[in-house]
Image (cartoon, grey):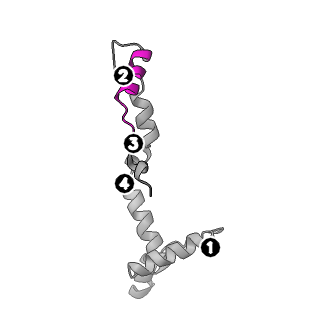
Amino acid sequence: MNFAALFMKGLRMANLQVKGIDDDFYEELKRLASSENRSVSQQVLTILRSYLAKGPAVDEAKTPAEVLLGLAGSWEDERSAEEIAGGLRAARRRSTKLDQGL
């Protein structure tokens, strides 16, 4: 095998075919690729590389709902639920924005 053949062998890359892409999704991908002066293939590779570079942190990231649920019960208050609710009701102010009309 000559040098050129060895060199070309080292440049072989796998191909990936993705089936079943929604037309709207593909059009959005094309627009994004175009806005960044890339082909669709280059854009997909860029997105995949970026995602994979983040590693486990992506999987470990909590959703806002998970963060909120984690806070549930994490505070302490000597007042009863009724006292807390009463305090919230008493602190409410009536909005007058719509009194003047739209």
x, y percentage for residue 79?
36, 13
Main secondary-structure element of the magenta-colored stretch: helix
Q: CA distance from mark 3 to mark 4?
A: 46 Å
Q: Quadrant of the N terminus?
A: bottom left
Which residue lies most toward the right here?
Answer: 20
Q: Earlier in the sequence, mark 1 or mark 3?
A: 1
- Pointers 1 and 3 in contact (CB under 8 A)? no
**Mark 1 surroundings within 10 Å by alpha-carbon count, few (fewer than 14), some (14 through 19), many (20 or more):** few
x, y percentage for residue 24?
59, 72
Q: Which residue is mark 1?
A: 23
**Mark 2 surroundings within 10 Å by alpha-carbon count, few (fewer than 14), some (14 through 19), many (20 or more):** few
Q: Which residue is mark 2?
A: 87
Q: Earlier in the sequence, mark 2 or mark 3?
A: 2
Q: Which residue is mark 4?
A: 54
Q: Secondary structure at mark 3?
A: loop
Q: Nearer the viewer, residue 66 or 75?
A: 75
State which region is magenta: 82-94
Q: Which residue is mark 3?
A: 95
Looking at the rendered image, the disc whose residue lies closer to the viewer, 2 or 3, is 3
- The amino acid beneath tag 3 is Ser
Q: Secondary structure at mark 1?
A: helix
Q: Nearer the viewer, residue 84 or 35?
A: 84
Q: CA distance from mark 2 to mark 3?
A: 18 Å
Q: Earlier in the sequence, mark 4 or mark 1?
A: 1
Looking at the rendered image, the disc whose residue lies closer to the viewer, 2 or 1, is 2
